[in-house]
Image: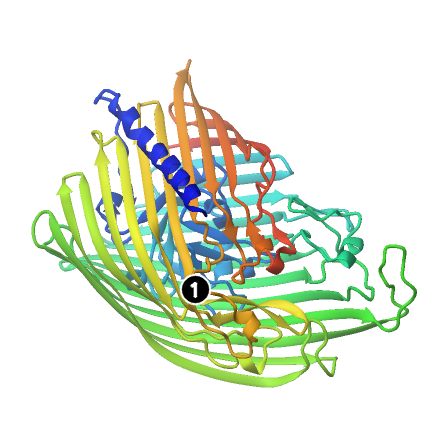
Amino acid sequence: MSMSKKIVASAVAAACVAMVPQAVVAQDSGEGRLDEIVVTATKREQSLQAVPIAVSVLSGEQLQVINLNSMEAISTHIPTVNFRANASNKDTALFIRGVGTISTSPGAEPSVSTMVDGVVFGRAGMATLDLMDVARLEVLRGPQGTLFGKNASAGAINIVSKPIGSKTSSFIDLGWYQGGEKRIRAGVAGSLGDGVRGSLNLLSGDFDGVVRNEFLKKDAQGYDRQGLRGKFEIDASDTLRITLIGDYFQSDDTGVRGPWVRPSAAGIAAIAPVVAGVENRSVFTNVLERVEDENWGLSVQLDWQIEAGSVTSITGYRKWDNTQYQDIDASAVVNNQFAQLGDKGIVDYSQWSQELRLASPSGDAFEYVLGTMYYSNQSDEVYRRDRDQCNGTLPNLANGLTPCAAVTSGFGRADYGTKLKSWSLFGEGTFKFSDSLRAIAGVRYTQDDLSYYHARISTFAAAVGGINPSRAQVRGSTDEAGLSGRFGLQYDVREDVMAYGTYSRGYKGPAYNAFFNMLPTADFAIEKEVSNSFELGLKSLLMDDRLRLNVALFDTTFEGYQTNYPDLVAGVIVTRFINAGDVSTKGLEIDLEAKVTNNFSFLGAAAYTDATVEKFKCPLGATPAQCNIPSGTRLPFAPEWKLNLGANYGVDVGSMRLDVGLDYTHQSDTQYDLTVATTSIQPSWDIINATLALSDPDGDWRVGLVGRNLADESYSTNLLPGGTQRGIPRDDERYFGIQARFNFGAK
């Protein structure tokens, strides 16, 4: 961004922030106040304003009202979060402050940790499940390794489910949206006897899709999902509570590698009648690309109150089965210009985790959390690629394509996987020097043991486009120890204004780049990733608790940054996983919420992020031309500016309440390729959403109209290397929907 554009963008952001305090000042001090937001960012319940961490929070109600059902959708409403979409959820990635991990390898962990009710999700693809039974979603920005573990070197997303009341209640949510999207949620909760409470939530949804397969005459980029979640809370005694949780999600998504944006001359002919372009939403393939996914888990949490504080034990098991079908050539007919490549990949993944914590009583002069964590996972994958190619050719057709005289078929199949065993000890304490000044100190020690295996068979004696030759099984292992930590000071400027300064160190363990076309150059371990972050923050409640304004400045460096790198393997571009060297991210974040009047509220969040390469490390086997990534190159999926503004006005209309909501998101130009190809840059975009709802003042029902992307602006969530194909979000075009919620029983 040029200096003039930066100045303009800064002025706009400042103006948006400034408008709210001015509006609030004009109001009478008797107007309503903001509700307190409680988070568990320090492994104990605390007010958001008291936590010396930059945290973004979305409530379950907010997610439901504006139809945010996935991490991809949530990333449009939290400026510091970005999401990389791909044909399979296995290939997705989350980014916080411009940093995330892109890899399909089972031996790589995400830099952004996702956990639900204290159970970490070890693979990024597991976190794409449909959200349900959510009380709140917390985004903890910056390294969170001290309390949240080794795969939180860039940040953490903490999802907390709703507590269960003692009185019986139930609900049903219905949603219908243009494009054939239908959703239903239902749940019941309440007492099951003396000291026992339970809840059951059900989900079903389906969507035709935003992409049209013109060859198969079918819609794609849609989903068909079902899920359930059960929870029991048992008061075993006055001091012991047992929480049992089980969930099961199943989905059949028709994801695609992406409609063509810039095909070759032959590609233009091969996909006709589809017309390529930056807003293309059609494909011409002979394979219905899809992902079959099963994701389930069980957890047991014990909360025991003792004289020294509270003891928490969380035991979790999760299982993830994922099968993907992809059309690699993205065309429909074999010819001399395009061989047919069809892939089927199977993931069989399981994990165990056990966390044990002791938290001192709140309010003591010295508060602390001590704990230990054991975590293990095993991932076994089978990946097969079938290839049909010409065996002799016929004269060219009028469109320039060369048909085959005969077709030769072959395949390659790889069996590979990883095992990880990890344990850690951690502790963090807060010492109160006075009522207003506190010191924070924490450290975590982690030991990782990682191993892998890989073998491939091929019907081709030598490498052909997309398939390497057979390879006998190889095995390898590595172990690594790492330290995480957090140190800082926290000062109450006054009762409702808190300032803090912290240094945080994050650690992510070693990895292996195990994938279908794995070569001997990938048989070595990828080194650990370490982050060092400095953060200054200010949290304030102003205007008689009607304005919440939080600001954070950060500067973070990553050593041994683990990321993908476009590489040509067997004639096909793959995302090779490497230690890319050193990168940094620094910037400014502003979050505000204002209760201007009892009827009018305002939300705003803005982020300026400067995420760049400090020193690129050329991977083994790469040519010098592939390593031409100079210092200062922007990281992929790291927009410089991102802004989200929302407003809601509610008024009584007879015996009902009418709410009108507007939501605006801006994202600046975003690079999707580390090699900085100009064709892989997504131009800036602006999305406007709106809601119009009628509800019962007692909360018995709510019916609303939702409008997404009212300006009908097309944008891409990913551009494959060279900008050849694009990822398409749900709101790539304008659509409307109707939502209805009915509550029964206790409020």
- Report whether residue 190 is seen: no
Residue at image coords 58%, 37%? 713
Residue position for label 1: 631
Q: Residue furthest right?
A: 395
Classify residue 332 as left or right of residue 120: right
Q: Is residue 585 above or below residue 651?
A: below
Q: What type is the residue that disc 1 sits on?
A: Ser
Of residues 493 and 440, the one drawn nearer to the viewer in this rendering: 493
Residue at image coords 57%, 55%? 678
In the rendered view of the protein, which quadrant contains the C terminus? top left
Of residues 460 and 270, the one drawn nearer to the viewer in this rendering: 270
The x, y position of residue 279, in whole percent, is 65, 44
The x, y position of residue 499, in whole percent, is 19, 47
Residue at image coords 44%, 63%? 110
- Using the rendered view, name the quadrant where residue 662 is placed: top left
Tell me if mark 1 has few (under 14), some (14-19) or many (20+) residues whose alpha carbon lies within 10 angstroms of its own.
Answer: few
- Using the rendered view, name the quadrant where residue 142 is placed: bottom left
- Report whether residue 51 is seen: yes
The x, y position of residue 284, in whole percent, is 75, 52
Q: Is residue 368 above or below residue 184?
A: below
Residue at image coords 39%, 22%? 650
Label 1 residue SS:
loop
